[in-house]
Image: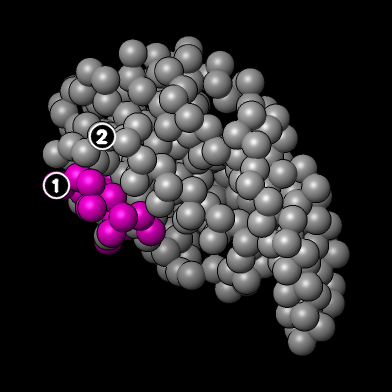
Amino acid sequence: MAAPATEEQPATPAGMEQDFKYRRFEKPRHHTRVRVIRRTLAARMEELVASAELPAGKKVLDYGCGEKPYEELLRKKFKEYIGADIPGNPKAQLVVGPQGELPLDAASVDCVISTQVLEHVDDPRVYLAEARRVLRAGGNLILSTHGHWRYHAHPHDYWRWTVQGLQKELARAGFQVVRMYPILRLSSAALQLWQDATSGSLPGPIRSLYIRFFQLWIWLIERRKPDEQMRDAAIYVILARKV
C-alpha cells in the first residue's frame, strides 16, 4: 500500500507520491536476493487458494494490491477481482484513504487478500477493522506479513509479529485463524539475514554468486516440509475467517 524508499533515507511525505509512481511497481532490482521466499510464498498462496478451506465466491478485494501478483490465481476462484491501493497506482480500481478507508459498502466482498502490507500500515487495528467491515458474514481474509525480517521502508516499516502476537491481533479484530503457513524456518531466516547483512559491500559479479550460494542453501533447508505449528518464521501466511 505504501511507496518504497531507500532503507537509509525513507521518503518524506512531500516526495511520497512521485516516489510511489516511479518505484512502487517496478520489479525489485535484486529480486534474486529473496528468490526462495518469492517461490515459497507463491507456492503457499497457490496451496491456500486451491484448498477447500477457502470457498469460491463472487468478489475478492486485494487490499494494497501493488502489482497484483495474485490476480490470475484469485480469478480461478472468484468471479470478480478488485485491486485497491493508495493514490498513484494506475493498476488499482479503488483508491484507499489516508487511514486505509475503502470506498466499499459494508459486507460487500467474499474475501480480502493482504500480502506484505500489514507491517507498513500506521495502525494495524484500523486496517484489519476495515478489512472486516467490507467482508460478508463468514468471509475470509488471506494475510501475509513478517515475523523475522529486515527493515524495509515503503516509505515506513513499523511492525513485526510473533506467531502468538499475530493470532491475538487477528482475534482482537474479529477473525478466527483457520490455517497458518510459516515461511522460512529459523535457520533459513538466519541465513537470509546474514546474506543481506554481508552482500552489500561485495563487487557485483561476486555478490551475484554469493547470493546464489545462500539462496541454494536456504532452498535445500526449505525443501523439508515445514511444521505448520512452527513458532519462528520469516513470514506467516494466514487464512482467517470473519466471526
In the picture of the structure, the residue carrying the numbered disc 1 is 79
Can you see residue 48?
yes
159 versus 165 height, above or below: below
Q: Which mark is residue 55?
A: 2
Left or right? Give the position of 196 relative to 102: right
Q: Given the image, on which type of amino acid does mark 1 rest?
A: Lys
Q: Given the image, on which type of amino acid does mark 2 rest?
A: Pro
Q: Nearer the viewer, residue 200 or 184?
A: 184
Q: Nearer the viewer, residue 154 or 116?
A: 116
Which label's residue is closer to the chain start, 1 or 2? 2
Left or right? Give the position of 230 relative to 50: right
| Residue beneath the point at 74% across and 56% down | 221
Cβ atoms under marks 1 and 2 closer than 8 Å: no
Q: Nearer the viewer, residue 178 or 80?
A: 178
**Which marked residue is nearer to the observer: mark 1 or mark 2?**
2
Colouring used for the render: one colour
Please say whether residue 75 is one of the residues in the magenta stretch: yes
* Magenta segment boundaries in residue numbering: 69-90
> Which image quarter holds the C terminus?
top left
121 versus 80 height, above or below: above
